[in-house]
Amino acid sequence: MILTLAHTKGGVGKSTAAWHLAHAFSLIGPVEIVDMDFNQTLHYVNIMAGRPFTVHQPRNVAELYDLISRTTHDVTLIMDIGGFDSDLNRASIRHSDHVVIPITPDRVTEVLGFRTFDAILSELDIVDTHFHVLFNNVHASTRNFDKFKKAVKGSRFTILDSAIRSRKIYYTTMGNGQSVFSSIGNVAAQTEILELRDELRRTR
């Protein structure tokens, strides 16, 4: 499976979600990471963590295609791409099984960024990729997503049933080179990430 986390806007939680998802998928099989984000967050966190994953950083489309062609079917390839439009980012989207765009539904700038991203996708000839909206960093009291669901209606995206709530543990564990699976006390966060992993696996 090739899974890409993407957004035209930075700071939406792509890298954080990708890191914890990588650990969730590693519980059931081999995982490799592709870090094409400008900040190289996953590259540096992986070093801090003692390099539990192979992290690739292709410099151009040819290197990305070579990597994908060499990736075996048993490997989950998780790609974190930059918040900008480029040939390399477009190529990663075109060759993904799943593209997940994290959105905090009560942030107007992220909703606008989603619309920009959807417009970019309309220019690409994509047939077999599943596109998803992930409600991310959601406040504990937020229950009504109707306003954002209207914005998504008519787009190529489906809204995932899984959601990631606003929890400090996602950031503190990652900042220490760990994940929410590093200790047994993070049950709520672990459950959220595992539910997201399993929902993506079911959508084939």
Image (cartoon, grey):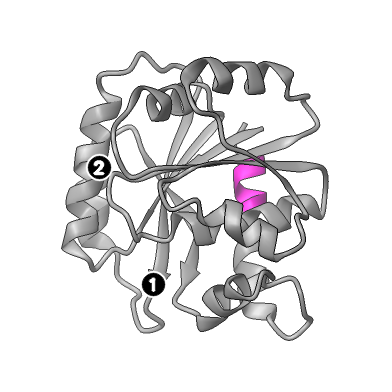
Q: Residue at x 32, y 28 (%)?
A: 86
Residue 195 makes an appearance in the image: no
Residue range in magenta is 197-202
- List x then y, in percent, for residue 71: 73, 24
Q: Is residue 35 visible?
A: yes
Vertical comparison of 141 with 6: above or below: below
Q: Quadrant of the N terminus?
A: top right
Q: Secondary structure at mark 1?
A: strand
Could you tell me residue 18's position as x and y percent? 56, 53
Q: Label 2: few (<14), some or many (≥20) within 10 Å?
A: few
Q: Which mark is residue 153?
A: 2
Residue 178 shown left or right of residue 34 in the figure: right
Q: Closer to us: mark 1 or mark 2?
A: 1
- Along the viewing direction, whichever of 22 and 36 lies nearer the viewer: 36
Q: Residue at x 45, y 54 (%)?
A: 14
**Residue 130 lies in the magenta stretch:** no
Q: Is 67 in front, or is 188?
A: 67
Q: Secondary structure at mark 2?
A: loop
| Relative image position of residue 49 (x, y in whole percent) | 72, 64
* Residue at 74% over, 49% down: 53
Please name the amino acid that badge 2 sits on. Lys
Disc 1 to disc 2, C-alpha distance: 20 Å
Q: Is residue 161 left or right of residue 169?
A: left
Q: Is residue 85 above or below residue 176?
A: above
Label 1 close to label 2 by CB (< 8 Å): no
Q: In the figure, 186 relative to 190: above or below?
A: below
Give the mark, 1 or 2, whose residue is nearer the N terminus: 1
Residue topped by disc 1:
138
Q: Amino acid at mark 1?
A: Val
Q: Position of residue 150 (x, y in %)?
A: 21, 50
Please identify the quarter of the rendering in which residue 175 is found. bottom right
